[in-house]
């Protein structure tokens, strides 16, 4: 599952890695939540960044309420079930990121963890996109969802699913206009666990309203104002 992620790298890193211009207005994001606009690269416009809203709204929807729930799509179902089967064939995208968050229940608390590549480099999730026209004002809303698969052995203790992280090779395959359906299973699979790591993140990431560097910092042993107990 992926319900929160980060893209904290500066614009020069993103531009160099993906070969696309990045607006000068770009600001690193430390705590991205569904409903927010973030950069993606689509199969229709491979040479530029598009800023779409996270939360999928199919073009045939009567309203945009589906965005609340459709921020993830299971890889096992995207070719066979609405609302994703049309987009899976013709409207694929990659979602730029450098880490994502999961919450693990420990005692009475749920503690946030940040998952990254061992190299801490920027990467891309496999995604689907669509556009929806508001019948009231004619405004076009472009949206995306992140595809998930069963978690690899490293991440199973955090969640039983994980987002599809693409390699540079499979990024290009996923954006190809001539991608055969037989290749989907090869692309949409758990990432190599030996190339990933995770750590307990600062609890400020719990709030979707907080989008500052502390969100991606490791949790301190003792937070300010708290006392340490041998029995904790």
Image (tube, helix red, strand yellow):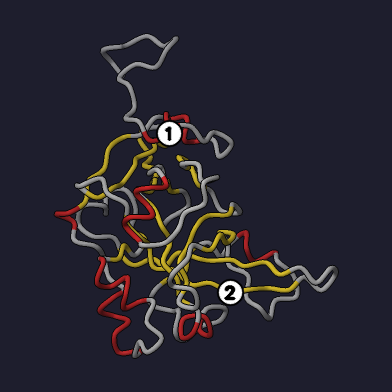
Q: How many marks?
A: 2
* Residue 10: image location, x then y, percent: 40, 43
Q: Is residue 22 left or right of residue 162?
A: right
Let me know if residue 161 appears in the view.
no
- Observer-nearest of 108 and 33: 33
Residue receiving disc 2: 130
Q: In which quarter of the image is residue 163?
A: bottom left
Q: In this view, does 126 lie to the left or right of 83?
A: left
Q: How crowded is mark 1: few (under 14 residues within 10 Å), some or many (20 or more)?
A: many
Residue positioned most to the right: 136
Secondary structure category for the residue under label 2: strand
Q: Residues within 10 Å of mark 2 (few under 14, many from 20)?
A: many
Name the residue located 74 percent from the left edge and 70 percent from the top edge: 63
* Residue 141: image location, x then y, percent: 67, 66
User: In the rendered image, which quarter contains the C terminus?
Assistant: top left
The correct choice, above or below, for 169 with respect to 206 in the image is below
Q: Quadrant of residue 57?
A: bottom right
* Residue 24: image location, x then y, percent: 51, 46
Name the residue located 29 percent from the left edge and 60 percent from the top edge: 151
User: In the rendered image, which quarter contains the N terminus?
Assistant: bottom left
Q: In this view, does 88 lie to the left or right of 25?
A: left
- Observer-nearest of 227 and 79: 79
CB contact under 8 Å: marks 1 and 2: no
Secondary structure category for the residue under label 1: helix
Residue receiving disc 1: 215
- Observer-nearest of 159 and 93: 93
Let me know if residue 224 appears in the view.
yes
C-alpha gap between disc 1 and disc 2:
30 Å
The correct choice, above or below, for 21 with respect to 109 in the image is below
Q: Residue 139 carries which label?
A: none
The tag earlier along the polypeptide, 1 or 2, is: 2
Name the residue located 32 percent from the left edge and 48 percent from the top edge: 158
């Amino acid at each position: 599952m992926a319900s929160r992620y980060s893209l904290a790298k500066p614009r020069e890193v993103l531009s160099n890695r993906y070969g696309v211009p990045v607006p000068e207005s770009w600001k690193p994001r430390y705590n991205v939540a569904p409903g927010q606009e973030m950069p993606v690269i689509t199969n229709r416009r491979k040479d530029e960044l598009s800023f779409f809203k996270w939360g999928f709204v199919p073009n045939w929807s009567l309203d945009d309420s589906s965005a609340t729930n459709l921020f993830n799509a299971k890889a096992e179902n995207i070719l066979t079930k609405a609302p994703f089967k049309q987009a899976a064939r013709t409207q694929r995208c990659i979602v730029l990121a450098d880490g994502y968050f999961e919450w693990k229940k420990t005692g009475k608390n749920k503690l946030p963890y940040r998952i990254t590549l061992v190299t801490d480099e920027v990467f891309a999730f496999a995604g689907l996109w669509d556009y929806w026209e508001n019948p009231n004002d004619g405004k076009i809303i472009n949206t995306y969802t992140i595809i998930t698969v069963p978690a690899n052995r490293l991440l199973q203790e955090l969640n039983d699913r994980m987002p599809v992280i693409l390699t540079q090779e499979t990024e290009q395959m996923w954006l190809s206009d001539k991608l055969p359906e037989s290749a989907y299973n090869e692309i949409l699979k758990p990432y190599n666990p030996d190339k990933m790591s995770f750590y307990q993140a600062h609890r400020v990431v719990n709030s979707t309203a907080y989008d500052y560097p502390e969100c991606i910092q490791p949790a301190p042993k003792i937070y300010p104002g708290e006392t340490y107990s041998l029995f904790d």
